[in-house]
Image (tube, grey):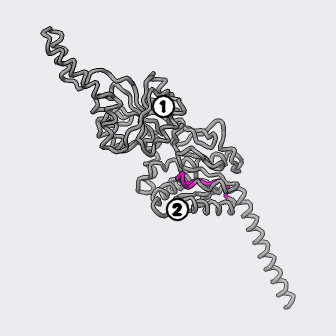
């Protein structure tokens, strides 16, 4: 009996030990073949809706990739540098090598202190990016590069650069310093909407052109010649006389203030069918359709058809609209997966810097010097539609 009990105990222990070892072996195999992706987003607080939309986009990408060996590990950045750092430190301790996030530039402050982790941030700021971080947002450099190529195609030569005397001053100065677009003049206007029209009148020399018209009309009124009377009839329908000394304008602004600037140009008798207007940082704002001053406004942006497809799929999945930038989070996971699957299921940071670049839903892009440099398209607003004018 004792021998039987001893045998059973030994058999039980043997089975238990072997099962444990098998489980350990299985975990080791799983770890070797599993792509672990950290996700660092604001999942609570003021910006939680943005963070949750980005997380859902990543989950949608995970579903579309359909590979059970990819695992995502979300953590809350709370949209501040301290909580971002603490969560990033946890990723480091857990052995996670690649992280999507954080979103905001301010959250990057302490990421340089994290070792052996690469962060794909969704920020579009490009100054002083930590060495372990890639700025994956639609940055100024990519937008200006697209405009420069388009300017060469349509052959414009006298371009004004305008920006509000506020948060975009630094962006405007950086653009001017690059000198890619060879700006004819650089101006700043008051950020107060009530003062914008006055500033635009000065830039366009509206009062001088209006005075020239009055002087010409008075002179023609004294003439009885037929041709002068015909000219007089024509001038009486006009607001100013003489053309402006520029052929294009780049405005570094958005939203209601951008609308005010463009309306001020119209009131200053600078028609948008004679001068080309451009802006940046646009994500297909359909409220522009109802503003006559916005007609023919040009801007560089991501692929509109792919954005529509992404938005439709997101809505079908979650019954809500995505954050307008969350397509970048979708592509970030796709980028990581592509590098991993094409490197024998091993993730290495250097794969992100493939000289041939990548093709995402939002655009073709290449990562250089810790920036995603996108090949953007140029669109213009025409008859309540976004029309692609440059690919």
**Residue toward you, 37 or 174:** 174
Residue 147 marker:
1
Q: Are marks 2 and 1 in contact (CB under 8 Å)?
A: no
Among the 4 quarters of the image, the one containing residue 7: bottom right
Quadrant of the drawing holding the N terminus: bottom right
Mark 1 lies on a secondary structure that is: helix
- Badge 2: few (under 14), some or many (20 or more) residues near its Cα, within 10 Å? many
- Asked if the magenta segment contains residue 104, the reply would be yes
Residue 181 marker:
none
Q: Which residue is mark 2?
A: 78
* Residue 230 position (above or below residue 258): above
* Residue 243 position (above or below residue 34): above
- Asked if the magenta segment contains residue 363, the reply would be no
* Residue 265 position (above or below residue 42): above
Q: Which residues are magenta?
A: 96-107
Q: At 72% across and 57% down in the image, what residue appears? A: 32
Mark 2 lies on a secondary structure that is: loop
- Badge 1: few (under 14), some or many (20 or more) residues near its Cα, within 10 Å? many
**Mark-to-mark CA distance, 2 and 1:** 36 Å
Residue 237 percent coordinates (x, y): 19, 23
């Amino acid at each position: 009996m004792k021998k039987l009990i001893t045998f059973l105990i030994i058999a039980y222990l043997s089975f238990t030990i072997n099962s444990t070892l098998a489980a350990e072996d299985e975990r080791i195999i799983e770890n070797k073949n599993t792509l672990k992706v950290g996700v660092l987003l604001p999942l609570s607080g003021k910006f939680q809706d943005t963070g949750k939309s980005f997380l859902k986009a990543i989950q949608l990408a995970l579903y579309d990739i359909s590979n059970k060996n990819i695992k995502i590990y979300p953590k809350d950045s709370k949209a501040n540098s301290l909580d971002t750092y603490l969560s990033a430190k946890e990723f480091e301790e857990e052995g996670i090598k690649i992280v999507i996030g954080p979103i905001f530039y301010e959250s990057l402050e302490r990421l340089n202190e994290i070792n052996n982790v690469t962060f794909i941030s969704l920020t579009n700021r490009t100054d002083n990016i930590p060495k372990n971080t890639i700025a994956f947002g639609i940055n100024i450099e990519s937008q200006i590069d697209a405009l420069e190529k388009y300017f060469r195609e349509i052959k414009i030569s006298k371009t004004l650069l305008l920006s509000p005397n506020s948060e975009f001053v630094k962006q405007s100065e950086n653009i001017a310093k690059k000198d890619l677009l060879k700006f004819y003049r650089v101006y700043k206007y008051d950020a107060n909407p009530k003062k914008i029209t006055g500033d635009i009148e000065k830039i366009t020399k509206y009062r001088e052109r209006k005075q020239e018209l009055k002087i010409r009309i008075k002179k023609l009124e004294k003439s009885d010649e037929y041709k002068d009377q015909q000219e007089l009839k024509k001038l009486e329908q006009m607001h100013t006389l003489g053309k402006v000394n520029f052929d294009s304008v780049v405005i570094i602004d958005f939203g209601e203030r951008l609308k005010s600037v463009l309306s001020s140009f119209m009131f200053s008798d600078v028609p948008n069918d004679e001068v080309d207007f451009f802006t940046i940082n646009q994500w297909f704002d359909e409220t522009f359709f109802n503003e006559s001053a916005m007609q023919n406004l040009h801007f560089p942006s991501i692929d509109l058809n792919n954005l529509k497809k992404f938005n439709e799929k997101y809505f079908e999945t979650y019954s809500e609209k995505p954050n307008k930038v969350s397509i970048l989070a979708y592509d970030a996971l796709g980028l990581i997966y592509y590098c991993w699957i094409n490197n024998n299921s091993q993730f290495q940071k250097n794969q992100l810097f493939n000289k041939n670049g990548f093709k995402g839903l939002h655009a073709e892009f290449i990562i250089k010097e810790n920036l995603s440099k996108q090949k953007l398209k140029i669109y213009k607003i025409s008859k309540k539609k976004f029309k692609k004018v440059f690919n």
